[in-house]
């Protein structure tokens, strides 16, 4: 393509309303233009990137036998009423009425439509499993659309749905999807993690999120430094790092005037926070309070706590009045010794020895406390948020914590929709049986933004090879004044095109600085500069988008040179 | 692809609610499924056809330098208010409100969005011309959606928009589009005509419709038997076939009791209808009535009549009372002799001699009437609908008339949108100038239905090669009982796939009749049957979808044989 026929819509100024770098760069590089809040036009350059993502997604879906179809964007409300989502889905669901005042929605997902389709088409377990996908424009009426296409209202999604006669069959398709998703993000050149999003009770994982790691991500991801293990920080299991040392100190009750927090206590005693124990009181599931003990430097993971059978849902902390009524002191002086309620101890707190904790009296703490000696051993459970350096729960390596952008989600739905909508098949014995379902989403347009968050520098975007709108930028210098340069550029352009390389020839005869800046901003991975001086010596100038410096390459061997670079 | 992994959703019964054959066959062949009135899911087989159409459209758009982008489906009402279409567009415009009660539309076309985009991006005439296209889901809230995807509410369209500094530049892009459209429909293997949809006053054609010829079409198309000339019957110019013969008969007033129509008159006189002249009275543009004279066998073209400056818009026929007040007789006895109002004569009526017409008195007609001798020559104009056999207006061949399905439309918009929305550039002299626009649509999903209307028989669809979901169907007979057949089928399947041929292997081990019926219903162009008897002799059985009989082909040369067939 030539820039004269494929105009770049680059902009110098950073748009003031764009908060994150991908949004800024997508606007500056002319990939998108805003039409309304959360609604964008994909410009030709941006669409080329989007199509590359779509093509990879499509190939990997086809590879696992998932069948592409195309369901309508506009869906009748009846189906949503049948699934009960018409009431359950909030104002993010864009509802509309047709000219006959019938209710419809602009689909944010298609569980209802696909379940309706399959219940009509499929009659026998022999026709299962069956998996459909589509790549389609969706609408979700976000209350605060922001970050460009990262959290847009209209967006492009790959959504897939699978139907099964039983759970093992669902698990197999789920595993296929897991591998396909991993292949997609790997092929796109993204640093990603498949994150455990929920641990199910019926054996095996029910949900994984796929996150692109980037500082601007909205989720905290914990992942092993050496293995595939990854989980949302909220869900990551905190593994006990060691066994409990032997007690060496004597129990002592100390007056601690002015000490109200764990930080105060550590400072007062001159010990590390990790030698202190904090005790939190929460509502128990059968009326009274429950004490939760954690190491002073650790943070309660409320999601884990809430799942404990002794603890009431939703998690509710005891009021100062309730604490005083039960313990007779302020929150900062609670400790497990002699506490008149059930006690749960976090795994890391359970291996402490000689620790300090509240003495259940204002202005007093114990030091040299030891489980088993000074107070009874209590129930040990996983209560805390993992921190960087914790052992990975799978036993391989330790955890790192980073921010992630969710770009994919696979989910075992079970019979949520098929039961509500009566989607059944006849089983081997001729009995009616509700189908089991899975659903699998990829935020196709969001991937483009996530890739930029992960791949950019101060000069612009640095696309992973597989997502670049063009592979090679050809920049002739002063072509207007030099017929040799112009002819060499044209010849090279023709040669690269004939070789199937996607090349963008900058035939604007612009100043070199303008061309360099544009090509770096839009992020083309390989740049070839054609100057008359180099040409005379049979040389061109090459620079990879991430290279610090350009270097001379021979005109003769250029095609092979570029092929090697592109192959990566 | 294997049928075991790519299930066919064929249905034996003809759906009762499908009125036209393409709708019936699309449902029966499992190409689409209905979700709501005018809203369909494209099943995997149908989507394959749709994507083939899209790919051809895309290639031809790219070839003429039209740039693909993707505008949002949901558009803010403000833009539609600016263009005034918010009020002008009827209930076919699907209007909706977001969660903040702001007005939006689900776009039926994108003139406003693209004009808004271009007015922001483009500042100078030097950046013109510029042409964008997209292939996108649209919504038009038809009052009575019907005929399946032929007249659906949600549909897929290729819409393109071009921007220019002047009319000659628009004309050039328009001509490019005309050629690209012709190339698209030719490549798709459709019998189509580019139909003149309007003749402009500012030189040259402003609008062409592209029609696929099919009996179920909603438009009557007149086209030359030898040249490219084609027009809507309403717009086709009726050319005078001959010059006027000399008068030979004497004028006579005849009593014609019981004669009220032209048919009555011809029968009464024992002459052909083409020797009679009928006179219609319509409202004139300045208050009185105007008489229109046509040959008895011709039909008034109301659209042509309405455009005449002497005739009032909209065309209004005189009431019996008004006729009697002016002429003193019933409508069937009007004639041009002595008529007290302006007279317009159709070209064909003007070359009559010795004709019969009303005598402006109930029960009386004249015979042997001749212009110039018995009454004054009057203004001659084109008033009638063309009929089959008329000379083609371009001077080449004669006209045929057939029904057409509109699948494309190219249109010179001029400044309708750019003026309303203030889309300007600076011209060479630095003056602000409103851009000139064109728009160009193709009904991508409608093409699929139109192709079936044109290509089917009693057994099902007979796809043009370029639109077929698969090129070759491989049908092994009794594969379950014959390992030789199964192995031969697998080997052939692998060979054809390796050769890049899209092949569907029916591995269901179904009865031959079921396989044959399915493959003919879904319309796969080439069928290979593998039977154990033929195999033993090194032979397979080939049948083209439109062939009456199958014939043996050698297994050895099969690939070449199929390649030749596919190449057409």
Image (cartoon, coloured by chain):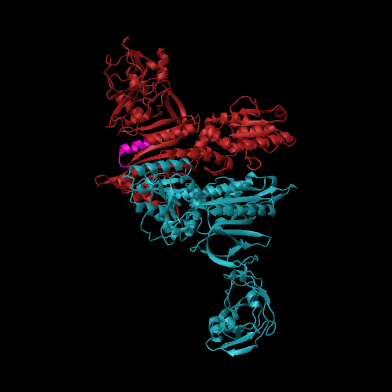
Chain colours: A cyan, B red
Considering the whole magenta stretch, tell me its main secondary structure.
helix
Q: Position of residue A436 (x, y in %)?
A: 66, 53
Q: B516 above or below B66?
A: above
User: As drawn, is A467 to the left or to the right of B179?
Assistant: right
Q: Nearer the viewer, residue B357 or B51?
A: B51
Q: Position of residue B216 (x, y in %)?
A: 50, 31
| Residue B258 in view of the camera | no
User: As drawn, is B15 to the left or to the right of B195?
Assistant: right
Q: A112 above or below B397?
A: below
Q: Nearer the viewer, residue B398 or A272?
A: A272
- Is residue B520 within the magenta segment? no
User: As drawn, is A366 to the left or to the right of A515?
Assistant: right
Number of marks in picture: 0
Magenta residue span: B164-174
- Is residue B166 within the magenta segment? yes
Q: Nearer the viewer, residue B132 or A529?
A: A529
Q: A23 above or below B468?
A: below
Residue B554, located in which quarter of the rendered image? Answer: top right
Quadrant in the picture for the N terminus of chain A: top left
Q: Position of residue B286 (x, y in %)?
A: 27, 32
Residue drawn at point x = 55 percent, y = 54 percent: A185
Q: Position of residue B181 (x, y in %)?
A: 43, 35
| Residue A369 in view of the camera | yes
């Amino acid at each position: 393509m030539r820039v004269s026929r494929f105009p770049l819509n680059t902009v110098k100024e950073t748009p003031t309303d764009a908060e994150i770098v991908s949004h800024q760069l997508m606007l500056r590089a002319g990939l998108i233009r805003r039409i309304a809040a959360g609604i964008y036009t994909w410009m030709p350059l941006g669409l080329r990137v989007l199509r590359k993502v779509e093509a990879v997604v499509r190939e990997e879906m086809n590879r696992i036998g998932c069948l592409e179809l195309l369901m309508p964007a506009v869906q009748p409300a009846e189906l949503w009423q049948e699934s009960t989502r018409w009431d359950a889905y909030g104002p993010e669901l864009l509802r509309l009425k047709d000219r006959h005042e019938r209710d419809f929605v602009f689909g944010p997902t298609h569980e209802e439509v696909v379940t309706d389709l399959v219940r009509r088409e499929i009659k026998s377990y022999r026709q299962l499993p069956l998996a459909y996908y589509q790549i389609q424009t969706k609408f979700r009426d976000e209350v605060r659309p922001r970050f460009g296409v990262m959290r847009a209202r209209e967006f492009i999604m790959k959504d897939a749905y699978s139907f099964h006669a039983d759970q093992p069959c669902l698990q197999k398709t789920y595993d296929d999807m897991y591998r396909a998703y991993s292949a997609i993000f790997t092929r796109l050149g993204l640093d990603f993690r498949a994150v455990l999003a929920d641990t199910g009770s019926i054996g095996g994982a029910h949900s994984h999120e796929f996150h692109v790691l980037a500082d601007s991500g909205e989720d905290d991801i914990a992942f092993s430094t050496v293995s595939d293990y990854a989980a949302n920080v909220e869900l990551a299991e905190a593994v006990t790092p060691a066994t409990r040392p032997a007690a060496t100190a004597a129990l002592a009750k100390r007056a601690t005037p002015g000490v109200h927090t764990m930080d105060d206590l550590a400072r007062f005693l001159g010990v590390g926070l990790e030698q202190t124990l904090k005790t939190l009181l929460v509502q128990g599931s059968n009326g009274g309070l429950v004490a939760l003990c954690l190491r002073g430097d650790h943070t309660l993971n409320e999601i884990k706590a809430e799942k404990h059978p002794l603890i009431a849902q939703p998690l509710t902390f005891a009021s100062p009045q309730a604490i005083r009524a039960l313990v007779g002191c302020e929150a900062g002086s609670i400790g497990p010794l002699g506490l008149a309620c059930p006690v749960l101890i976090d795994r890391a707190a359970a291996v402490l020895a000689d620790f300090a904790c509240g003495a259940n009296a204002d202005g007093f703490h114990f030091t040299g406390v030891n489980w088993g000696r000074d107070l009874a051993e209590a129930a040990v459970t996983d209560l805390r948020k993992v921190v960087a350096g914790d052992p990975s729960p799978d036993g391989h390596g330790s955890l790192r914590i980073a921010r992630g952008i969710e770009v994919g989600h696979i989910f075992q739905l079970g019979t949520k929709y098929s039961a509500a909508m009566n989607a059944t098949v006849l089983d081997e014995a001729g009995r009616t049986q509700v189908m089991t379902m899975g659903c699998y989403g990829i935020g196709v347009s969001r991937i483009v933004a996530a890739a930029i968050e992960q791949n950019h520098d101060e000069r612009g975007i640095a696309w992973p090879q597989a997502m670049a709108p063009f592979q090679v930028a050809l920049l002739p210098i002063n072509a207007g004044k030099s017929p040799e340069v112009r002819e060499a550029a044209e010849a090279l352009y023709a040669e690269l095109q004939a070789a199937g390389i996607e090349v963008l020839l900058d035939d604007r005869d612009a100043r070199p600085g303008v061309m360099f800046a544009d090509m770096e901003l839009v992020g083309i991975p390989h740049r070839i500069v054609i100057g008359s001086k180099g040409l005379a010596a049979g040389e061109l100038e090459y620079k990879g988008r991430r290279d610090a410096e350009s270097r001379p390459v021979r005109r003769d061997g250029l095609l092979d040179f570029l092929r090697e670079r592109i192959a990566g």
